[in-house]
Image (cartoon, helix red, strand yellow):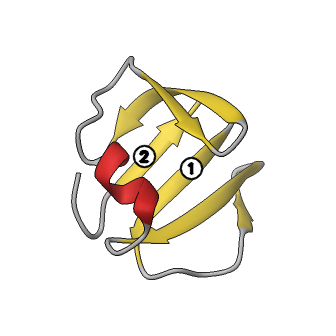
């Protein structure tokens, strides 16, 4: 996982790159994070099928593009 990666979870999408306000795509929220965000260290080690804790929420990673 690096800049430009889109992670699809069971509840949303996470885009790694620049930080933007949340927006909708295909009915799911898209959360944008930069490589400087604290969550990025956790994200970059994740693989498809794993769970991700983001704040108080838990997501299952469905696809990494």
Q: Where is residue 40 in the image (x, y as percent from the top left)?
A: 36, 57
User: How many numbered circles are shown?
Assistant: 2
> How many residues crowd mark 2 within 10 Å: few (<14), some (14–19), many (20+)?
many
Q: Nearer the viewer, residue 25 or 32?
A: 32
Residue at 45% x, 26% y is 62
Kindly indicate the quadrant of the structure image that contains residue 63: top left
Real-space CA distance between mark 2 and mark 1, rounded to the nearest whole angstrom: 6 Å
Kindly indicate the quadrant of the structure image that contains residue 5: bottom left
Residue tagged 1: 13
Residue tagged 2: 7
Q: Is 55 left or right of 53, judged from the image as shown?
A: right
Q: Position of residue 29 (x, y in %)?
A: 72, 55
Taking 18 as reference, is 56 above or below it? above
Q: Is 21 left or right of 16, judged from the image as shown?
A: right
Q: Is 22 left or right of 32, judged from the image as shown?
A: right
Dot 1: what SS? strand
Q: Position of residue 47 (x, y in %)?
A: 27, 28
Q: Nearer the viewer, residue 11 or 43?
A: 43
> How many residues crowd mark 1 within 10 Å: few (<14), some (14–19), many (20+)?
many
Mark 2 vs 1, N-terminal side: 2
Dot 2: what SS? strand
- Determine whether label 2 and label 1 are within 8 Å by CB: yes
Q: Is 63 left or right of 11, judged from the image as shown?
A: left
Name the residue furthest top: 49
């Amino acid at each position: 996982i690096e800049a430009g990666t889109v992670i699809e979870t069971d509840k949303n999408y996470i885009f790694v790159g620049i930080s933007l306000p949340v927006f909708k795509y295909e009915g799911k929220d898209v959360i944008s994070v930069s490589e400087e965000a604290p969550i990025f260290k956790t994200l970059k080690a994740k693989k498809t099928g794993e769970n991700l804790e983001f704040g108080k929420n838990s997501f299952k990673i469905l696809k990494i593009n």
